[in-house]
Image: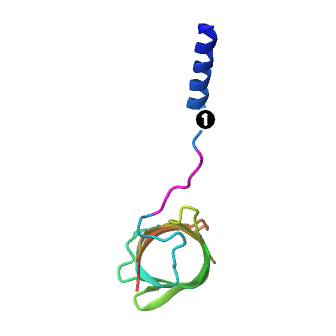
Amino acid sequence: MKTVITLIILTLITCGCTTSAPYSPPSGPKDLPAVFDLTGTWAGTMTGYDNGIGFNDHAGGTITLVIAEQHGRIFAGNLTVVENGKIIFSSEVAGAVGRDGRTLTIVQESGYSTGEITGTDTLELIYVNDAEQFSVAIDTLRRV
C-alpha cells in the first residue's frame, strides 16, 4: 500500500512539473498603451551603407515619416528623405505593429523597414533595400 501511495505522489509531482504555463505575450514598454497611436509626423536622421558608395552618415539629411491613418495595428502614410535641401526619395508606406505592441514592419516602393517603438515619442527603424544597388540604414525618429 505504501508503494502505491508513493507511486501516486510521484506521478502527481511529475505531471505538475511537466505541464507548461499558459502563454502570455511579452509586454511592451510600461508607458505604451496596448495599441500605440503612431499617427502624426516623425522626423530624424539616418546612417547607413550603400553598395558601391560605402558607409554614409547622410550629413545634413533628414527623414520624415507622416502616418496619416491607423486602424488598430495597421497604419499608412508617406516617407520622405531630404538631403542638401532636395527631396531624394518620397514614397507611400504601409505598416503593422507587432503583437508585442512594440515592433514595427513597414513596406514602401523600394525596400522595407523593421523597427521598434523605443518610447512614447521615439522610433528606430532599420531600412533594407535588396536591389542590385543594395543599401541598409538606421533611422532614428522623434515625433514632432
Which residue occupies 41% across, 74% down? 120
Q: Is residue 45 magenta?
A: no
Q: Is residue 136 above or below residue 67?
A: above
Indicate the quadrant containing the N terminus: top left, top right, bottom left or bottom right. top right
Residue at 64% of width from left, 11% of height from top? 4
Q: In the image, residue 16 lies at what x, y percent?
A: 58, 31
Horizontal relation, residue 14 to residue 49: left or right: right
Q: Position of residue 23 (x, y in %)?
A: 59, 49
Q: Main secondary structure of the magenta part?
A: loop
Query: Where is residue 141, by image quadrant?
Result: bottom left
Residue 23 is a magenta residue: yes
Q: How many neighbours does mark 1 have within 10 angstroms: few (below 14), some (14-19), or many (20 or more)?
A: few
The residue to which callout 1 is attached is 19
Residue at point 55% right, 72% down?
35
- The image quadrant that residue 72 belongs to is bottom right
Whether residue 135 is visible to the viewer of this picture, yes or no, is no
The region drawn magenta spans 22-28
